[in-house]
Structures are given as C-alpha cells and as structure tokens.
Amino acid sequence: MGNGPAGHVARSTVRPNSETAGGAPFRTFLHTDDGVRIDFVYDPGPLVHDASRPPSGDLVFVVAHGFTGDADRPHVRRVVDVLTRYGAVVTFSFRGHGASGGRSTVGDREVLDLAAAVRRARGLGHARVVTVGFSMGGSVVLRHAALYRPDGPASPDARTDAVVSVSAPARWYYRGTAPMRKLHWMVTRPAGRAVGRYGFRTRIHHRGWDPVPMSPVQAVPLIAPTPLLIVHGDRDGYFPLDHPRTLAEASGEHAELWLEPGMGHAENAAGDELLARIGDWARARGG
C-alpha cells in the first residue's frame, strides 16, 4: 500500500529514443496494448564500470509500485534513489493511479502496464531488464514474467531478464489480516472506492475479475529459467510468512528467498541496505 503526500517529478519535454540511455531523465506517457495511458518516468543513473561485475550501462530496473502508490510517491522515489547507483531506473504509475489513465483492476490488467514499461525500457537501448515489484506490484512482476517468457508467444521485447518480488501475496482474495480486510472493503464497496479515489488518488474499477487471473503461486513455476528473488519481511502486517514460503516452494527451488528480520510491508519498509542488496543481486543476475 502506498500512502502519504505525493512528491513531484517534473515533466520534461525530452522525448525517448535509442540515444537517451545514460543521458538526461525524462517523463512521458505510454499506451498499453489495451489503450490505457500510463505515466512513465526514466532516470538514467550513473554509468558504473567495475571490472568484477558486468557493466551497468545496459541494465535497467523497472519498478512496479504497490496499490495506492504512484511514480511520485516519496517512498517510490527513495527506491529510485538507491537503485540508480546500480543502473538506470524506470518508474511508472499503474492504471488508475496518479497521473495514469484508466481504473485499477488491483493486479489483473496491470500486467499490460508493466509490459509497456519494459518494452519502452528496451527501446531506450537497455539490453538487461530487471523488474522489481512491491506488494500488488510484486504480484504483477510474477505474472508478467510467467506470461512474457523468452520461449512464449507474447512480445519478446516486453520480457524481463530477472524478477524481484517484494511483499507479494501468494494467492488472491486473502483476508486473514486487518489491513487486507480494509483493502477488500476499499475495492469492493462504493464507499471504499470513494475513499480510494479522494483519499489515495486511486481510481478503482467497480467490476470484479472475470475471468480470475492467474494467481502468483500459479505463476512462479512458469518463470524458470529467469532468475527470481522473493523478498518478504517477518513483520509484514498484510501477508504473513506462509505467502513467501508458498511462492518459493511453488517455484520448485528455482527462486531465491530472503526473509528479512524486522521488516514490515513493501516500499515503506524496504530500507536502503536491503535495496542495495537487491541492486547487487540484479547486477549479478540480470542478463
């Protein structure tokens, strides 16, 4: 869940092209395969060269925020600040969030938003893409990697080279904690959706899922051989530890699991040291 006052990233007049990687930051809009306009921010980061590691100039992180977040939220910008030490960073606002169009489907059609952002990141000249998702975004990066496999029929330029899923649920419709019961009220009730719209800048679709999308635990066995890192805090108030353990078990021991002592939920709880370790992991495996 994202919360707190939104910050601001100035909208630039710079337009993306294959020569901007490693150049100036810019902001623009993308269009998804189903026609939704998505707010997109690109931070090139430094071109770091280290003889002991792959060069970072071709590496880009595509960050997928949590429900009620957006590309301008301070906790999302902090993630960017750390990851730009390791490569370029793309952030975007999921549909129904922030300056993006459409309405949130709470993890279903959002996979198209991520695919559009990954596709644009590759169009900027980055050969290695690592998707990093938090909470709802953590479930989206798992489904995206399963649907956009290197050997699959989906657009090859929308695939990822490594996946980091932080604080993600393993299964849909979970109501076992008080925060998740509140979230379900926000999503399913007219009064809750009004709170989402005016209190959190999140416009939520009134229709339920039909059909129900592939769950995260169904997605993880399909991700191999793409490297997968599952990160979860042992004080997560939304999803207890059976969620990450179920995801790791379903991966068939393909995934790496980090259970973080003292960590709560998603971007707000991910400290700079953890984000730096994620950056190191990605540089070693994202290509």
Image: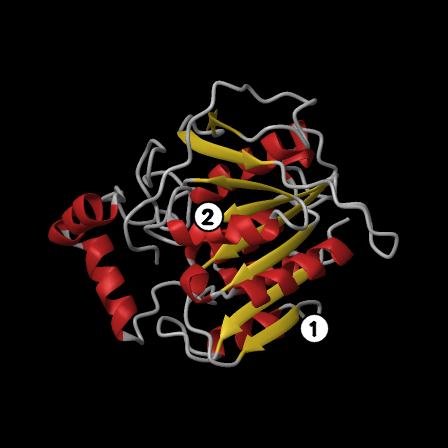
At x 83%, y 51%, the residue is 50
Q: Is residue 168 left or right of residue 98?
A: right
Q: Is residue 186 above or below residue 103?
A: below
How many numbered discs sit on the rendered protein? 2
Quadrant location, the N terminus: bottom left
| Secondary structure of the residue carrying numbered label 1 | loop
Q: Nearer the viewer, residue 160 or 109?
A: 160
Of 31 and 272, nearer the camera is 272
- Circles 1 and 2: CB atoms closer than 8 Å: no
**Residue 36: x and y, percent?**
40, 29
Q: Position of residue 192 (x, y in %)?
A: 16, 54
The kind of residue tagged 2 is Arg
Image location of residue 20, percent across then percent down: 65, 25
Disc number lying in front (1 or 2): 2
Q: Which residue is mark 1?
A: 253
Residue appearing at x 44%, y 59% in the figure:
267
Mark 1 vs mark 2, CA separation in Å: 32 Å
Q: Quadrant of residue 259?
A: bottom right
Against 206, is 277 above or below?
Answer: below
In the shown orientation, is residue 225 left or right of residue 97? Answer: right
Front residue (pair 36, 164):
164
Residue that label 2 marks: 77
Give the amino acid type for the residue marked by disc 1 in the picture: Glu
Q: Residue furthest right?
A: 51
Label 2 secondary element = helix
Position of 199 compared to 134: left or right?
left
